Amino acid sequence: MTTPQPSTRPPQAAPGEPLLCAEGLHTHFELRQWGFVRVGSVRAVEGVDLTLGAGEAVAVVGESGCGKSSLARTLLGLHRPTGGTVRFDGTPLNGLSGRALKRYRARVGYVQQDPYGALPPFMDIQRILAEPLIIHGVRGRAERERRIDTALAEVGLTPAADTRRKFPHQLSGGQQQRVVIARALLLRPAMIIADEPVSMLDASVRVEILELLRRVQREHRLALLYITHDLSTVRHYVDRALVMYGGRIVEQAPVTDLLARSGHPYTEALLSALGDPDADNARRQREVPGGEPPSLVHPPSGCRFHPRCPHAMQGKCEVEPPPPDFRPRADHRVACWLHE
Amino acid sequence: MSPWLQGLTRLRQYPSALAGLGIIVLLVAVAIYAVTAIPYSEARDLWRSGEAWQDLPTSAPPVWADRLLGGDAPRTIRVATDDVVMEQERYEGVRLQRATLPVEFPYGGFPQEVNLFVESQFDDRQPFVRLTWRTPDGEAIPLGARRVGESERISISQDRQLESRLGFAPQVGLFTDAAPGTDDPQVRQGTYELVIEAIQFEETATLDANLVVYGQVHGLFGTDHKRRDLAVALLWGTPIALAFGLLAAVGTTVTTLIIAATGVWLGGWVDAAIQRLTEVNMILPLLPILVMVGTLYSTSIWLMLGVVVVLGIFSAGIKMYRAMLLPIREAPYIEAARAYGAGNARIILRYLVPRILPVLIPTFVTLIPTYVFLEASLAVLGLGDPVLPTWGKILNDAQAQSALYHGHYYWVLEPAALLMLTGLGFAMLGFALDRVFNPRLRSV
């Protein structure tokens, strides 16, 4: 078995090809009755195209139930995609198995939403961090401890010797999330997928954790896929943002452009829902579209957003889904008929 | 500090846990003593042999039980010719050997039996032996004369002629001065003597005799109907009971847990197959199957253990563990483990199973005595191991000999007490462990 190289591996993708490239990605979950009769399916991810360059930080924004976590899990290889392809570093992930899949997993770090849940409660930090190293064949206790100490120092948990002996419940939420990030960095990945990494943390430590992620992402030139429901945490921490609605990407643009000149009515709704820390806001009526997030079992026809869209065009929006690449600007893509 | 150590330290707060642990340590010490003092094969042979027990009384209660009830029942007295000086007189062609065996008899009851074991070595002509009984006041009662072989048992108390001469059974008549036929003869205490006179016809011939006046009580634990000292069976029953209980508990819980975890983790048809197998197995009656195996095949305790473990693998425990594991299966840390490449076996053994160990360990501890009881029940049903002495087999013998009807309570109470002690020890420790590791049961 090959030991992972101790140095950061530069991405091997051919020039011009992004590190991660998903095309027409579908992830459906079948609903069964009595265990075998198909009665429908949850279309969590439906036709997502996504690229992530080496060293690029991208956010996927959307409300709960829009399929963004399923997208993350599909990209991690935890769900098998129903359709479409994912290529990482030039290698297709479809049908990858055994050692190749394991090698891919060493190159992708995963940061989850609930830091306490993400750490096995019966292991101490030393053990938790040793697990990925053991699994990927890092032999030698001394070598493992050296790498654990490095990772702990990198996420600001010093002195590392103190932390190593503790159990997850003895750490604060922020410290737990730092351990999770340290675990994601241990195998020196090329990409990190962070699924709502701060939504369960106290507001006071959110910025610290986001800045930590941004810092390690820049230092190691990692690709970062940051999944969030909160547009307000996006601005300073990523280069590009994607807005997801009903299993589809509805808009993607560089983050400043997206926040300043959003093209999709849904993005506008998200932006207007951003809170200002002002008590008067509680009474102010905002222009937020009513209605529920779309059902992923029986999604609306045409544009998924049309039942809630203030600009819906009769006879157009509910009939035909908009193609995802209307371009109001060169690097700004919107899936909305308004931009036809 | 690891949660395990914390739990064990907390155990100290429960006196019942310490008492239970004390009982278990005691039983383990007894078990270790048993296997070191009497090795396995020796114990097996000893228990089956008849000769080893020939100078113990039959079905005699323990001494302390009699003394506690204010009794003065006699203990067994053994006197051998080796202990006394053998007089020798020479005549023409023959020798006369004479030995006087003193029997000090200070007890209030009559002995159970009187036997003389004679061993002699000769080439051709058997020695001729004449026995005389002398009471403390010098009266001599002839016990007859006979030729003796190389190894012979002279059952003095079985001598019908002597019985009719004395007017009492010999073991009574020899130890009383009451008139023949008296209803309630009293023991005359004092020193009796058995005079053995042997005529040897060969120069090198020898004679050794061993007089056994059997008591009515014996030792710490008493004897059974085959004169066997129950101490041996009670002692050796301990390691067998503990080994059976422990192996059966380990065999069933560990396999059950791993199978349940595998089913939960892999899901799909594997889980379905495990569930259906469990359901079928749950309605199979364990005891009748064991009885069948025992009757038709073999009652070896190790075979029984195997059957118990095999039938215990797909037991109701699987349902319980499955219910506990299903929510853990969805825990984020397991998803994380998959994301950093942990394989199925690693996830099952290192991520799923450890989460329910705190619940498992108390269950495991309380499960041990149930298997100890199962082994005893099998033995009581007559399916005990054919060669090994166990607590259950003592009970089985006692039942077969109607021990309670005959008032031999010790025979039933001793193994029962040990069984209860075992159950109590493990139960007390198990319940305390449950309170330590199962926070919902802990009183605030």
Image (cartoon, coloured by chain):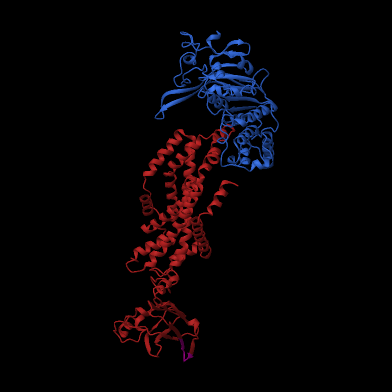
Chain colours: A blue, B red
Q: Quadrant of residue B322?
A: top left
Query: Residue B399: which quarter of the image?
Result: bottom left
User: What residue is rendered at 54% in x and 9% in y?
Assistant: A338
A24 and A60: which is toward the camera:
A60
Foreground pick, B254 / B12 = B12
Is A148 drawn above or below residue A15 in the view shown?
A: below
Q: Residue furthest bottom?
A: B91
Q: Is residue B143 visible?
A: yes
Q: Residue at x 66, y 28 (%)?
A: A211
Q: Which percent across, then down, holds residue A317? A: 48, 11
Q: How many numbered dots are placed on residues in this image?
A: 0
Q: Quadrant of residue A250?
A: top right
Residue at the (51%, 46%) spot, across then down: B358
Start and end of the magenta stretch? B89-99
Residue A162 horizontal/vertical position (percent): 66, 42
Magenta stretch: dominant secondary structure: strand
Q: Is residue A107 visible?
A: no
Residue at 29% of width from left, 82% of height from top?
B183
The residue nearer to you, when weighing A235 against A118, is A235
Closer to the camera in the image, B337 or B244: B337
Placement of A303 over or under B242, stated as above or below: above
Residue A100 position, x and y percent, is: 60, 29
**Picture coordinates of residue B196 (x, y %)?**
43, 85
Q: Does the segment drawn in magenta span residue B91?
A: yes
Residue B416 is one of the magenta-drawn residues: no
